[in-house]
Image (spheres, rainbow, N blue to C red):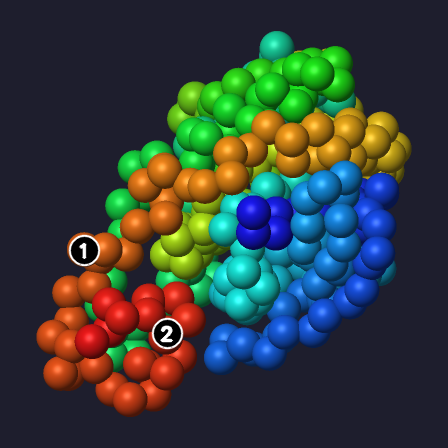
Amino acid sequence: MSPLGVIGGSGLYQMAGLEGTREERVETPFGDPSEAYLLGRLGEHEVAFLARHGRGHRLLPTEINFRANIYGFKALGVERIVSVSAVGSMKEELRPLDVVLPDQFIDWTRQRPSTFFGSGVAAHVSLADPVCSVLGEALAGAAALCGARLHRGGTYLCIEGPQFSTRAESHLYRSFGVDVIGMTNVQEAKLAREAEICYATVAMVTDYDCWRAGEAPVSVEEVVARLRDNARTAQAILAGVTGLLPVSRTCPCASALDNAILTDRAAIPRGARERLRLLAGGRLG
């Protein structure tokens, strides 16, 4: 089985239990990933881990090179990515320290590249179902086995940040019917689909944003205070999911580009062809 890719968000900067670890830096046509990838084994499964914000949490959400991060996983042979992310709850029943496995995203960002294509190549992948159902099912099983307070399904609203929401914004977002709010996952989901990599989010609730009556607005201190417990839960889920994944992929994620590229192959510039060869292969002509 190909390595399992893991993206660690706020509070998860390393992978407990990885054995035989080594670091690997990957050069990409889109620049440098957030950090060197940490490769190792978790039980019988190979894992490629990446700290989304870099070691020491150096990168703001808008500063993350999402294209390089996902491209780097592709270059390492990764076919599935689990993204672990701290989120705010937008619903009363989603309590701090709960685990949410969202299956939908809303992109409320404004300043981020969200595609590998362009500059001479037009492609449009389907994103109706942005989370791989097979990977999501395995994560749900692993979360149940470790006793996590689990909520399956829901919508993740991705905002630009780095500021937390105003109260007016928080109430507006609640009117959308979203479940959790964060600052990072939607670009990962879009780019993973273009790279034909299965993707799923493990959203770890840390707070209630600032919409809840009688609740103090979210603060860095509050988030950090809950990250340690959330990180332990995330580690347990990741340790369990590797044994629940099928060896081969039969999901549509693996063929997302089959009919996505519209550009006349003869019109594709040589530079674009080289930049996209790892991702699109023979579909470029």
Number of numbered callouts drawn: 2
Depth check: give the residue in front, 48 or 156: 48
Q: Is residue 164 visible?
A: no
Secondary structure under the numbered disc 2 in the rendered image: helix
Q: Residue visible at 36% across and 48% down?
A: 254
Q: Is residue 185 above or below residue 117?
A: above
- Residue, disc 2: 276
Quadrant placement of the C terminus: bottom left
Pointer 1: residues within 10 angstroms few (<14), some, or many (20+)? few
Measuring from the top left, give residue 125's x and y in whole percent.
Answer: 27, 52
Amino acid marked by disc 2: Leu
- Residue, disc 1: 259
Can you tell which quarter of the image residue 108 is in? top left
Pointer 2: residues within 10 angstroms few (<14), some, or many (20+)? some
Secondary structure under the numbered disc 1 in the rendered image: loop
Inter-mark Cα distance, 2 to 1: 16 Å
Q: Residue visible at 74% across and 34% down?
A: 239
Amino acid marked by disc 1: Asn
90 relative to 43 in the view: left or right: left
Can you tell which quarter of the image residue 131 is in? top left
Measuring from the top left, give residue 26's x and y in whole percent.
Answer: 63, 74
Q: Is residue 243 above or below residue 130?
A: above
Q: Residue visible at 24% across and 79% down?
A: 120
